[in-house]
Image: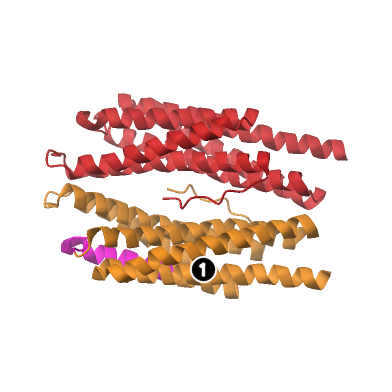
Chain colours: A orange, B red
Amino acid sequence: MRKVFQAELHQIGEDLIEISQLVSEAIQKANSAFQGADTELAEEVIAADARIDFLQNNLDERAIDILALQGPVASDLRMIVGALRMSASLERMGDLARHVAQLARLRYPAHVIPAAIRPTFDELASLDMKIAVKVTELLETRNLELANDISAHNARVNELHAGVFKSVAAADWNESAPTTVDVTLASRYFERFADHGVSVARKVTYLVTGEWQPSAPLT
Amino acid sequence: MRKVFQAELHQIGEDLIEISQLVSEAIQKANSAFQGADTELAEEVIAADARIDFLQNNLDERAIDILALQGPVASDLRMIVGALRMSASLERMGDLARHVAQLARLRYPAHVIPAAIRPTFDELASLDMKIAVKVTELLETRNLELANDISAHNARVNELHAGVFKSVAAADWNESAPTTVDVTLASRYFERFADHGVSVARKVTYLVTGEWQPSAPLT
């Protein structure tokens, strides 16, 4: 019984890693679609998001079964509750990658982001991709240095996100209103994605150290 | 022991109701601040959000303690896991009310929303307030007709949210870029708020009927 239980717990961990890898792929492809105005790649991301949702539902059901049938305590219980929360954040990251892809599809064949502000978005995208890769690695290795990196990347994302609003408010911003809307939403999606990455990292940290740092107010 | 357990479970339910009431107050005050460009009211909402976050953390800790110490099964287990998820959605609704209030504060003494599009935002705000009140009532009464109402209100919110983007893209939209940004973000906050309301309603429905309707992809 105990052996089966350990195998089930292990599988929950593996599933989180799998979902995280899919999220990582999703944000990479979404960014390529976004930066290259590639509608086929955008469609791929949009279609693949259903798989992330399915895996999340599946993981959640099994986690609840484990709670019901095994009555785990102490660190096993923390792991299961943590998995339920991390899966919710990962699922949301998948949604946000899909939103980025949907913007690319909506504006195709045009680019979503005007040339002048594209370097900012390239950096935002690259930080989100780093965060996604490091979240997967953190789930695999539980090396908490990765959690620090993720947090540092997120701080930079927040700076860039604030910078986008400064650019839009500047006197030389001459873009159309729909472009301004797209820029606003895209920046917000990248910012939320990073924030959920931090949220997952914080939960892994909690599982490793047993110390909970209450989350900073999410924005 | 069983009696203590039932009392603890009951308290979790009461706490969800309390958090939901605070969220309801928050969105009402945020809307008044937003519509009336009232910075004092906005400050109140921003300050009160810390209380919602505190209550959520507190509820979550007790829910996890119950899982650890009582090993609940069947409907009790569903209730605890549901409470953990509902508290996350309610906390997020509190954040979104705070964001609306922050927009009001940022633009004070000006209004965030240009006069021409204000009727749309009045309706968005009024729907979000109805949703918040009905979520509280649903948690109290478990009357599933309220869940249907919430879902219908949310459908209307989605229509209005799409309508905002149409207004912004119309030829007669002559607002500044920062105003366009504010309108975009505000509309998105109202839309997300409603979506989390539906999410809570769906979980209550699950607790009552035992039937899970997988969530429609959140936007």
The quarter of the picture where residue B19 lies is top right
Secondary structure under tag 1 reads helix
Residue B182 visible, this orientation: no
Q: Is residue A20 left or right of residue A73?
A: left
Name the spot of residue A19 as percent of width and height, x first. 53, 68
Name the spot of residue A62 as percent of width and height, x first. 68, 61
- Say which residue appears at 45% left-offset and 61% top-offset: A94
**Vertical order, B19 against A89 (above or below):** above
Of all chains, the one bearing label 1 is: A
- Say which residue appears at 72% left-offset and 34% top-offset: B11
- Say which residue appears at 46% left-offset and 67% top-offset: A23
The quarter of the picture where residue B152 lies is top left
Magenta stretch secondary structure, dominant: helix
Magenta-drawn stretch contains A129 = yes
Q: Is residue A206 left or right of residue A105?
A: right
Query: For the N terminus of chain A, which image quadrant?
Result: bottom right
For label 1, the residue is: A20
- The boundaries of the magenta stretch are A110-131
**Vertical order, B61 against A211 (above or below):** above
